[in-house]
Amino acid sequence: MSTTNGVDVAQLGQAVEAITGDETIGQFRFRAETEWTDGLQCVTAIDDFDQAGERIHTQEFRIEGDEPEQILGKRTAPNAVELLLAALGSCLSVGYAANAAAMGIELEDLRFELEGDVDLRGFLGISEDVRAGYNSVTCTAYVDADASEAELAELRDRVETTSPLMDTITNAVPVETDVVAVRDGA
């Protein structure tokens, strides 16, 4: 087994080949269930997902959410916009590790610093001229690898072009919502 950056390069190639031959293998549906617990706190459970129409049960993960005291929370967990930065960092980390392995680049160290600016006047409905979400997000990748600057630039381009989170954040994604009234005894 040949691994680069902890990634089985042969298995990565086989996955690409399998999905190229049968696009349904690459079709996934992920899900999460968030439950409010108290105040501004919640817990999100992540367990199963679908691949090619088949339900895959895995380990359950629980992610807590809260707000800082300055926003009426208790700061027992990160808030949602911080979790978005974490999700982006996680996605980029996966993308750099896998693409570097495919390119034959050995990573010694890899980390990301992410920051985003939010103006609460949008979230609180104080100003219609201020968006509710991030005004901007910056990300700095620190890469220690056996690669030239040109190779690292190519790696960055590959990752940013194929990152699901980068795509989701930078392009409008339709979101459909529904509200279901649930009452005891109904």
Image (cartoon, rainbow, N blue to C red):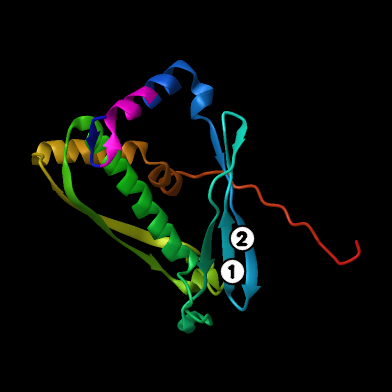
Q: Is residue 158 left or right of residue 86?
A: left
Quadrant location, the N terminus: top left
Q: Amino acid at mark 1?
A: Cys
Location of mark 1 (residue): 42
Dividing the picture into quadrants, the one containing residue 140 is: bottom left
- Is residue 76 visible to the viewer in this orientation of the structure? yes
x then y, percent, for residue 39: 61, 79
x then y, percent, for residue 174: 57, 44
Q: Is residue 24 magenta?
A: no
Residue appearing at x 53%, y 69% in the figure = 123
x then y, percent, for residue 185: 91, 65
Looking at the image, residue 117 lies above or below residue 69: above
Which mark identifies residue 167? none
Q: Amino acid at mark 2?
A: Thr
Secondary structure under the numbered disc 2 in the rendered image? strand
Spot the residue most to the right: 185
Tell me where the magenta segment starts and ends, as one range. 6-14
Location of mark 2 (residue): 34
Residue appearing at x 64%, y 69% in the figure = 36
Q: Mark 1 to mark 2: distance in Å?
A: 7 Å
Residue appearing at x 90%, y 61% in the figure = 186
Looking at the image, residue 105 lies above or below residue 61: above
